[in-house]
């Protein structure tokens, strides 16, 4: 059974969904189809190739592709994942895509499934965002890039790890993918169709439309009554209600950016020392 040759380990909210979908276009690359299954993180009992049978089965569809891989958004900060990957696949190549910690964290908070904001909260949005950030570790942990990457540098040779920047993907996709493809050893001149944008962010509003939608989607008699009466137009109603809960993302404010980057300042400095790369532009 063939093993993966590379894994994109994150970071979370650093365009991993886009990277997954773009890489699937390349004829020399076979990817796990279900991005987000993250079995090497969700299944801590996988400690040998025998344990990894279910994981490796995801690559059974590979035919003539030269390299096999997976794109994850959580492996970078997942507990014990770095050593687990190294134990299973010691010669694998690791790719990490890093995004400005303040922008990554802000996007993560706004994206989170249970984060709906009231009109009152939006009026003092900076305070709400910072309160969430400082009180919920799940939003802070993924942006500790030094702490997270050090686990990979501890168990892999430096030559097996490639650090790419989210900003480079935004500003020059072809150059970004040429560098990635060269690293994993496939045709780097392949031209991707990069028009499609994935997971475009929106601000989710807690309003009357959300409450109506919750009633429609609930498992109760009201739902069945509404479905029987409104069945022909129910899909259109749901689409309208979902759209009315979303607004364009407000820009990241200077206050939020400054406080979050100050929080990560020491980690960013250590990241530069670990990787030999410059990240001082994040702090300026």
Image (cartoon, rainbow, N blue to C red):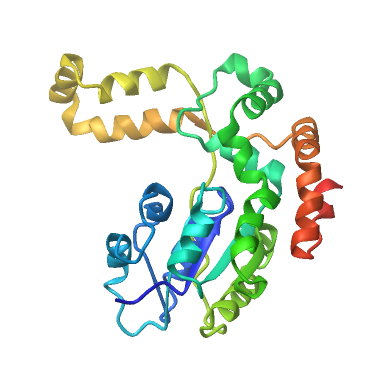
| Residue at the far right in the pictured view | 284
Q: Quarter-wise, where is residue 70 in the image?
A: bottom left
187 is higher (above) or lower (below) than 112: below
- Residue found 54% across the figure and 78% down from its top: 184
Q: Nearer the viewer, residue 87 or 129?
A: 87
- Residue found 71% across the figure and 41% down from its top: 102
- Left/right of residue 198 with respect to residue 214 in the rendered view: right
Figure disc tally:
0
Can residue 90 be seen at all in this image of the molecule? yes
126 is higher (above) or lower (below) than 271: above
Q: Nearer the viewer, residue 157 or 71?
A: 157
Can residue 197 be seen at all in this image of the molecule? no
Quadrant showing the N terminus: bottom left
- Left/right of residue 194 with respect to residue 218 in the rendered view: right
- Residue found 47% across the figure and 65% down from its top: 87
Q: Quarter-wise, where is residue 142 in the image?
A: top right
| Residue at the far left in the pictured view | 228
- Left/right of residue 239 with respect to residue 231 in the rendered view: right
- Left/right of residue 157 with respect to residue 198 in the rendered view: right
In percent of width and height, residue 44 lies at 39, 49
In percent of width and height, residue 208 lies at 42, 16
Q: Nearer the viewer, residue 67 or 50?
A: 50
In percent of width and height, residue 139 lies at 59, 36
In percent of width and height, residue 11 lies at 58, 52
């Amino acid at each position: 059974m063939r093993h993966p040759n590379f894994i994109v380990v994150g970071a979370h909210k650093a365009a991993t969904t886009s990277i997954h979908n773009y890489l699937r276009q390349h004829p020399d690359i076979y990817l796990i189809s279900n991005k987000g299954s993250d079995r090497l993180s969700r299944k801590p009992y996988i400690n040998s190739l025998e344990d990894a049978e279910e994981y490796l089965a995801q690559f059974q569809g590979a035919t003539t592709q030269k390299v096999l891989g997976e794109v994850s958004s959580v492996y970078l900060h997942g507990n014990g994942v770095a050593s687990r990957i190294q134990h299973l696949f010691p010669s694998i190549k690791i790719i990490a895509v890093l995004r400005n910690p303040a922008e990554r964290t802000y996007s993560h908070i706004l994206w989170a499934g249970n984060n709906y904001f009231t009109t009152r909260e939006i009026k003092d949005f900076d305070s709400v965002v910072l309160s969430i950030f400082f009180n919920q570790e799940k939003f802070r942990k993924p942006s500790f890039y030094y702490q997270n990457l050090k686990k990979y540098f501890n168990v892999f040779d430096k030559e097996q790890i490639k650090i790419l920047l989210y900003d480079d993907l935004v500003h020059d996709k072809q150059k970004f993918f040429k560098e990635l493809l060269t690293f994993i050893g496939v045709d780097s001149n392949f031209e991707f169709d990069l028009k499609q944008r994935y997971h475009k962010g929106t601000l989710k509003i807690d309003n009357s439309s959300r409450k109506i939608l919750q009633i429609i989607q609930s498992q109760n008699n009201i739902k069945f009554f509404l479905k029987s009466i409104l069945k022909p137009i129910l899909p259109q109603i749901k689409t309208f209600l979902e759209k009315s809960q979303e607004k364009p993302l407000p820009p990241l404010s200077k206050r939020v950016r400054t406080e979050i980057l100050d929080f990560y300042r020491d980690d960013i400095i250590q990241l530069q020392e670990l990787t030999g790369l410059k990240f001082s532009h994040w702090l300026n």
